[in-house]
Amino acid sequence: MGDAGHSAVIAAPAVAAERLRITEIFHSIQGEADAIGWRTVFVRLTGCPLRCSWCDTTYSFHGGEWRAIDDILDEVAGHGVRHVCVTGGEPLAQKRCLLLLQRLCDAGYEVSLETSGALDIAPVDPRVRKVVDLKAPDSGECARNLWSNLGHLLPHDQLKIVIASRGDYEWARGVVAEHDLASRCMVLFSPVWGKVEPRELAEWIIDDKLSVRFQLQLHKLLWNDAKGK
């Protein structure tokens, strides 16, 4: 009886380990990074330890619904896509996100992860295309950058810096040069919607001859919202 009781105690967490708190799962067009334009299923996890000043997904900070990973994969499969983006919030704030990423890769999807850059990316499955933020000063969260993440970037990853002012741009330009980021992976400069005119940022990049990729959020151009649907 003692052995049976012990087995019951350790079995329960195994069930919980297969669940994640999900804000939404939706099918749309990828609006950012190197998969831009592809039909994509977005799996948005709930929760984020950061509070960036320009965040456009604050609705994902709280709430959500517990979903079994098997159920998540079943819903993704129903959309008939090749590309899946795991996003948030900050998806890595839920440890079982790593298992979801692995399961999606095992299922044959092209998987991307959108992460704030404040949490360790080292354990992420190397098949995943990581889109890692570096928080510029105007985000209010610059101190949260985990600089050791730069050493874990792979050539297929992308490093994104969201720029809200000329000061942010100059900070970003300096960081790219100091850490030779353009030689590690694709570097994306993206203007904050309504804060920096896209043409202005494009001209700064041209004038300084930076080896970075200018990026607009395609979903906002198409639907004028954060999600692209």
Image (cartoon, grey):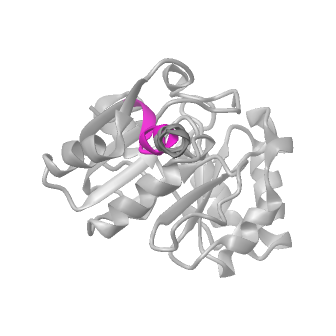
The image quarter containing residue 67 is: top left
Looking at this view, is 98 or 128 the one in front?
98
The image quarter containing residue 213 is: bottom right
Which quadrant holds the C terminus? top left
- In the image, 195: left or right of 128? right
Q: Is residue 19 magenta?
A: yes
- Percent across and percent down for residue 221 are 35, 37
Please tell me which residue is depicted at 33% across the width and 50% down the height of the picture: 30
The image shows residue 63, relative to residue 96, as above or below, that is above
Looking at this view, is 182 or 105 the one in front?
105
Looking at this view, is 96 or 168 the one in front?
96
Please tell me which residue is depicted at 74% across the width and 35% down the height of the picture: 139
Please tell me which residue is depicted at 79% across the width and 32% down the height of the picture: 140
The image shows residue 178, relative to residue 49, as above or below, that is below
Looking at this view, is 82 or 5 the one in front?
5
Please tell me which residue is depicted at 55% across the width and 40% down the height of the picture: 2
Counting labels gives 0
- Percent across and percent down for residue 180 are 77, 77
- In the image, 183: left or right of 168? left
The image quarter containing residue 109 is: bottom left
